[in-house]
Each structure stands twice: as structure tokens, then as C-alpha cells.
Image (tube, rainbow, N blue to C red):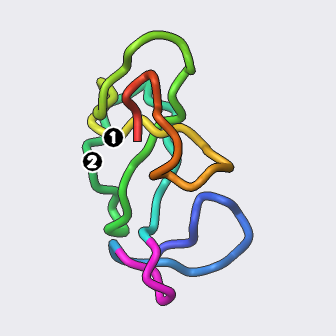
Amino acid sequence: MILDTEGDDQVMSGFYAADGSINISVVDGSTYTGLYAANGSINVVLAPGTGNVGAYAPCGGWWVTVSRVPFLLELLMDRSM
């Protein structure tokens, strides 16, 4: 098991957390990481918010956009997740 990237000492391991949510590891996207982190979580890169970025960042992780609106109600114009 590996400590999470938030630094709050919560141990996480695997794709799903105990509550059913997906574990993610935020990466900066500057080097190739692939989709999965060593601890089984998904690598994500925060989308820049400009232009069409698609689903996958060049590093292999998913582009993501933080949203306060439920996902089904928001159209992400940059096509990130």
C-alpha cells in the first residue's frame, strides 16, 4: 500500500476506494506515467481549460476537469473527463 498524493496520510491501494469511488493520483503530466499508478489508482492531469484536449494526456493519464455541477448536467467543452 502507498500513501496518497494529498499528503494527509490516508492509505489507499487499488482502483476503488472503500466507499466505491475511484482512487486517483494527480500527476503534472511532464513525464510519461501511463494510465495506472503503482498503487492501482488512475493517473490524472488537470486540464488547462483552453482548447480541445480529449480524454488522454500525452503522459498516458486522463485529462480531468474539476466540476461543482453533477457530471451529467455539465458539458465539458474541452472533452476532458
Label drawn at residue 51: none
Q: Position of residue 55 (x, y in %)?
A: 30, 34
Residue type pointed to by label 2: Leu
Place of residue 51 in the rendered image (x, y in percent of width and height, measured from the top left): 45, 10
The answer to whether the residues at label 1 and label 2 have Cβ atoms under 8 Å apart is yes
Q: Residue at x 59, y 58 (%)?
A: 5
Query: Label 2 belongs to which residue?
Result: 35
The magenta segment is 16-21
The mark tally for this picture is 2
Residue at point 56% right, 81% down? 11
In this rendering, is residue 60 above or below 19? above
Check disc 1 and give the amino acid type.
Answer: Gly
Task: Give the quarter of the image for residue 16.
Answer: bottom left
Judged by its main secondary structure, the magenta piece is loop
The relative height of residue 61 versus residue 31 in the rendered view (above or below) is below
Q: Which mark is residue 61?
A: 1
Give the image location of residue 44, x and y in percent: 43, 44
Q: Is residue 2 left or right of residue 68?
A: left
Above or below, comparing residue 42 to residue 80 in the picture: below
In the image, residue 28 above or below residue 14? above
As drawn, the residue found furthest toward the bottom would be 18
Residue 67, percent across and down? 62, 45
Residue at the location (34% across, 76% down)?
14
- Is 70 within the magenta? no
Q: Earlier in the sequence, mark 1 or mark 2?
A: 2
Quarter holding the C terminus is top left
Real-space CA distance between mark 1 and mark 2, rounded to the nearest whole angstrom: 4 Å
Q: Quadrant of residue 78?
A: top left
For the point 25% across and 43% down, the residue is 34
